Amino acid sequence: MMRIGYFGDEGSFTYLSAVGRFGENNQFLPAPTIAGVFDKVRRDEVDWGVIPFENSTRGMIYDTVDELVSEDFSSSGILIYEELATKITLSLLSRVSLPQIRKVYSHHSPLMNCRQWLRKNLPRAEAIPVENTSEAARRAATEESSSAIASGEVAKIHNLRVVIPNINSGTENITTFFVIGKKPHPPTGRDKTSIAFSLEHKSGALYRALGVFARAGANLTRIMSRPLEKKRGEYIFFVELEGHQFEEKTGKLLQRLRKYVTSMNIISSYPIAKEGS
């Protein structure tokens, strides 16, 4: 039996993704914050951690990115082992019927994803953001005239009824999760590598660094910046590129890149997710 740490509570989408990946016959340990999952892995309290990384309709989970680019992470021994792409189906849960609902609780992202449906079907209900969908379900179960936007599975945990299933907006809603641990994933031939680097605070520094990728013909799948806590006005860059750090082409590219940056951490190499994996 493995110990799996995850963000949120039982019934949250991260929990469901973790169970889907590892199976029910394991010990699942919740953490109230994303940083808490990293801490559990760092202290060897769990074998693996599962955290959200990106939602296809609402964008990046910045708490996860900030952990990955932090100084603490670079010395923690933690690695991204794989990514999971999970289709998210949002339902309206309550103890009362649709006309009786006056409050709708959920995390900010589901509220935004379902805002068109809410405007059309519950125009007078108050949309109230909470920390996660499990907390939303708890409130819907205990407060009068309240509801939650969450997974249908969480309804069973809190004795709620699925009033309306699948109230997502028209666009497909996919969330990418990371499985983190202390074991590296060997190359599969279909991998990506995540790195974090900082640059001199000079004109053209980023241009010169990106030129390394261009000259190598590397495909960057993501580049974003996050502010450095201790250096106002300066940033650390989070980059994803196709390829595995232990492959010759990618390994040489990363060696050349070090000449153009002031610091660099190779976060991890891991398989590219398949939808529903």
Image (spheres, rainbow, N blue to C red):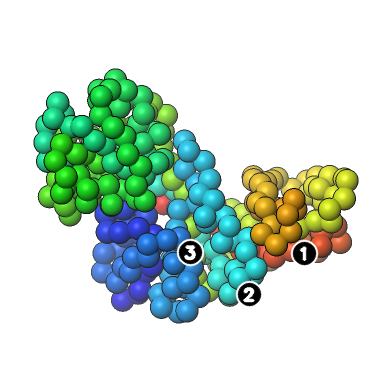
**What residue is rendered at 28% in x and 32% in y?**
126
Q: CA distance from mark 2 to mark 1?
A: 13 Å
- Of the residues shown, which amino acid type is indicated by label 2? Ser
**Residue closest to the far bottom:** 44
State the quadrant of the N terminus.
bottom left
Residue 6's quadrant in the figure? bottom left
Q: Residue at x 41, y 40 (%)?
A: 109
Give the numbered dot on residue 35.
3
Circle 2 residue:
75
Name the residue: 41% across, 37% down.
173
Residue 263 image label: 1
Q: Residues within 10 Å of mark 1 (few under 14, many from 20)?
A: few
Residue 181 in picture, x, y percent from top left: 49, 70
Mark positioned earlier in the residue sequence (3 or 2): 3
From this viewpoint, is residue 269 visible? Answer: no
* Residue at 44% across, 73% down: 40
Q: Secondary structure at mark 2?
A: loop
Q: Secondary structure at mark 3?
A: helix
Relative to 191, 25 lies left or right:
left
CB of mark 1 within 8 Å of CB of mark 3?
no
Numbered disc in front, either 1 or 3: 3
Above or below, comparing residue 166 to residue 66 in the picture: above
User: What distance separates the C-alpha of mark 1 from that of mark 3?
Assistant: 23 Å
> Which x, y percent locates residue 167?
29, 31
